[in-house]
Amino acid sequence: MSSLMFVKKHAFYCARNFGSQSYKKVRIKDILQGRKNNESADVQGWTRSVRKMKNHVFVDINDGSTAQNIQLVMSKDLFDRRVQFGTSISVRGKIQQSIQNEKNKYEILCDDLDVLGTYAEDAPLKKNASYDMQHLRSLLHLRMRHYKMAGVLRARNCVEMAMHKFFQEKGFLHIHTPILTSSDCETGGNVFSVQPDQIDEQESSDSSEDFFGAPAFLSVSGQLHLEACAMGMGDVYTLSPAFRSEKSHTRKHLNEFRMLEAELAHSKDLADMVNLMESSVKYLLQELLLNCSLDLATIEKDSPGHLSKLEKVASKQYVIMSYTEAIELLEKHQKHLQTASPSWGEDLNSDHETFLVQHCDSTPVFIVDFPSCSKPFYMPVNSDGKTVAAVDLIFPEVGELCGGSLRESDLDKLTSRLTALGLLPAYEWYLDLRRYGNTPHAGYGMGFDRFVTFALDIRNIRDAVPFPRYKNSCVL
């Protein structure tokens, strides 16, 4: 068929089916923001409600782009009886201002309707039924259709885009760090080993042969790779999946999670990183409040006061205290703790973190200068010989949100630590970063899913991600 014949046939098809009217595909979000008034639109979505009147039928649909539905107005002759809650439809019509609908200023006067997919009567999600997040977790493949989970995914998208905007505007370069790695950044042993499912017959005789020539793991952090990039590219960051084989069943932990990590080149002051942490977190909250107001309003109905809590955390100056000061404070207020106060050198648990934040009027708390015995090899020891230049950011409700440190720049000290830990020669490449043009640098990581958990008042982190992975659960 010639190009001219194809164009003529296509034009005839359009004229036959839709007349001379030109319909443009439009998202409901754009319509409700008033950008498309009086335009002819082609809209797809899922039915939320149907109301039949004497001469007209009113159908509310949603396409996932916003928490709000849009009302369709159509004649009874145009209405298809298959349209009910959950039905996927496509409509064409004119966008107009709504006179009677108080919720939405705009509606669509329909010229044409197609049913794209029906909704079976035995569907597990019913109209007007009340479902909590725990029940929706049992329907991982369907829960995005519920307004609660849809709101979570829109908010995650908003936060991620804001994160990129923040770091890009500060001149950071985004890096894709590897998921498969031969390095355990934390040297804690909580790693997932990676092996091929099948081994070639020629290789089966030597069971000790590694697929990559060395043991490989799922990454627990992209920090070491970011350090390598920072030594040649300057300030860098990543948002990458991380994996830890911890067997804990808590509302704060996942075995697969997203981690925001940043490395600041030419930085030798912990205050630089503390300021970056605070400014970035506040920026993300401010962008969320600005761009996800409808979804946050839904959360506010179930949790009155949540918006004011976000506004407070997004604007108030965060508290800074040393690890030693935190220990002294916990010892002084032992009677207010549910667990024993820690001795100097011990880790802080959730009870300790909760008290410290509440003691500071529910304001996020930076804890700096941790005991050197409890931190990884890459953190430099302070002049006191007992603590390292490290910082954790403790947040209301979720506990530790960020953690970071200066990076050890002294080649001899770093070599000594790696030797004592038995990590050489595997980490010889890491020493090369100090041998060849090293510069002082610092870095930190933020639990992206934990941030979403706090920002959306989610009780369990498993409901802050679309497909959670945790002990005994890897569904889909």
Image (cartoon, rainbow, N blue to C red):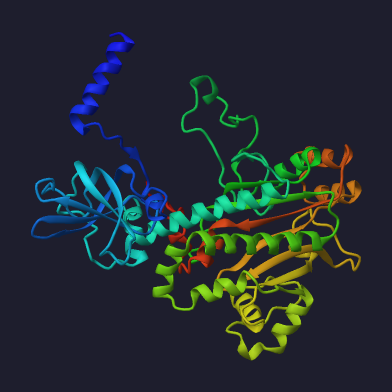
Q: Decide if residue 253 is in sight here.
A: no
Establish if 428 lies above or below 204: below
Establish if 383 lies above or below 107: below
Q: Identify the residue shown where x is 64% and y is 46%.
A: 238
The answer to whether residue 397 is left or right of residue 304 is right
Residue 146: x %, y % from top left? 32, 58
Q: Which residue lies furthest to the top in this view?
A: 2
The answer to whether residue 10 is left or right of residue 220 is left
Establish if 5 lies above or below 312: above
Residue 293: x %, y % from top left? 47, 64
Residue 51 quadrant: bottom left
Q: Quick one: 180 or 9, which is closer to the camera?
A: 9
Q: Identify the residue shown where x is 74% and y is 79%.
A: 327
Q: Identify the residue shown where x is 80% and y is 37%.
A: 232
Establish if 207 lies above or below 58: above
Residue 123: x %, y % from top left? 20, 54
Image quarter where the N terminus lies is top left
Q: How many labels does the image show?
A: 0
The answer to whether residue 188 is left or right of residue 41 is right
Residue 248: x %, y % from top left? 51, 62
Q: Quick one: 379 or 128, which is closer to the camera?
A: 128
Q: Decide if residue 398 is in sight here.
A: yes
